[in-house]
Image: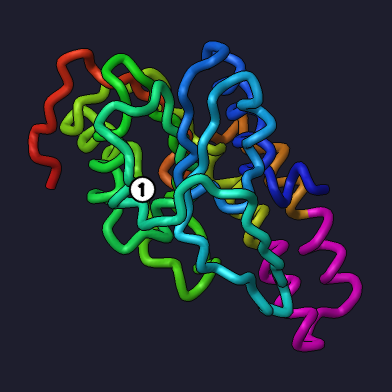
Amino acid sequence: MDQVLNFSSHMRGSWMREQAAAVPAGARVLDAGAGEGQYRPLFAHTRYASQDFAQYTGSSDAAAPETWTYNKLDYVCDITAIPVPDGSFDAVICTEVLEHVPEPLAALRELARVTAPGGRLIVTAPLGSGMHQEPYHFYGGYSRHFWERVLPQLGFEIDELVPLRGLLSHAAQEVHRASRYMALQGDLPQDQAWVMQEWLPRLLHDKDPAVPVEQFTVGYMVRATKRASAREEGAT
């Protein structure tokens, strides 16, 4: 069932393993907004460094409680002001971070600055999600068109732009989420709980490939390469 309810996490994990394997041994890698450092082991063959502002402490939401422990961080700072020279990294990863940044375009400009010419930007961000990691949730809705507009302006060529499934998988996730909140209120009979927590989420998730509706994807995974003569063209 976890493959249904957390399909986006599983997809990101698989995709990130592919991206990490393609980064050459010894390459300089920055994990921006690294949090608990879940991707650190994937980059053990590189010169990995991590950055985060290190202020989130977890959630007490009864339906989705979350504890949080930051891994060892190399740079504790704002993502818009990383204390390294231009072009310091051959690859920069930034996963599920931009919705938590008050100035996402400034953050992307900074990530572009620290990426070496010819280097890779590996980034994911949601299109559809509820508020999470509050109070540090400021934006959502990073569409295909956002990436196709902004990344070239920042000097990148997009190599991959992959949606995290579509409407049916998104709906499966939210039906189950709704059932959890209903159960907390004591307003979900057992037969309805089975439909909402088991049968309908599985049905919707399994049908998603046959009914692809990208407009309601939960987000995108993007890999882009910084042009050798990259020059920012004024993203707005």
Query: Left or right of 208: which side holds 196?
Result: right
Percent coordinates x, y for residue 90 in the rendering: 40, 21
Tell me if residue 44 can be seen.
yes
Q: Which residue position is annotated with label 1?
A: 142
Find numbered disc 1 in the image and state the secondary structure of the residue it sits on.
Answer: loop
Residue farthest to the left?
A: 234
The relative height of residue 228 versus residue 74 in the rendered view (above or below) is above
Percent coordinates x, y for residue 227 in the rendering: 23, 17
Indicate the colouring scheme: rainbow
Percent coordinates x, y for residue 51 in the rendering: 47, 47
Instruction: Residue 192: say if magenta.
Output: yes
Residue farthest to the right?
A: 190
Q: Which residues are magenta?
A: 175-199
Viewer-proximal residue among 23 and 86: 86
Mark 1 closeness class: few <14, some 14–19, many ≥20 residues within 10 Å: some
The relative height of residue 17 versus residue 201 in the rendered view (above or below) is above
Viewer-proximal residue among 86 and 156: 86
Query: Left or right of 56: which side holds 76?
Result: left
Tell me if residue 220 can be seen.
no
Query: Magenta residues: mostly which secondary structure?
Result: helix
Residue at (72, 72) in percent of width and height: 65
The relative height of residue 33 versus residue 26 in the rendered view (above or below) is below
Instruction: Residue 155: say if magenta.
Output: no
Q: Which quarter of the picture shows residue 14?
A: top right
Residue at (39, 29) in percent of width and height: 121
Which amino acid type is marked by label 1? Tyr
Residue at (64, 51) in percent of width and height: 71
Residue at (51, 68) in percent of width and height: 55
Q: How many marks?
A: 1
Q: Which quarter of the picture shows residue 7?
A: top right
Percent coordinates x, y for residue 213 in the rendering: 48, 39
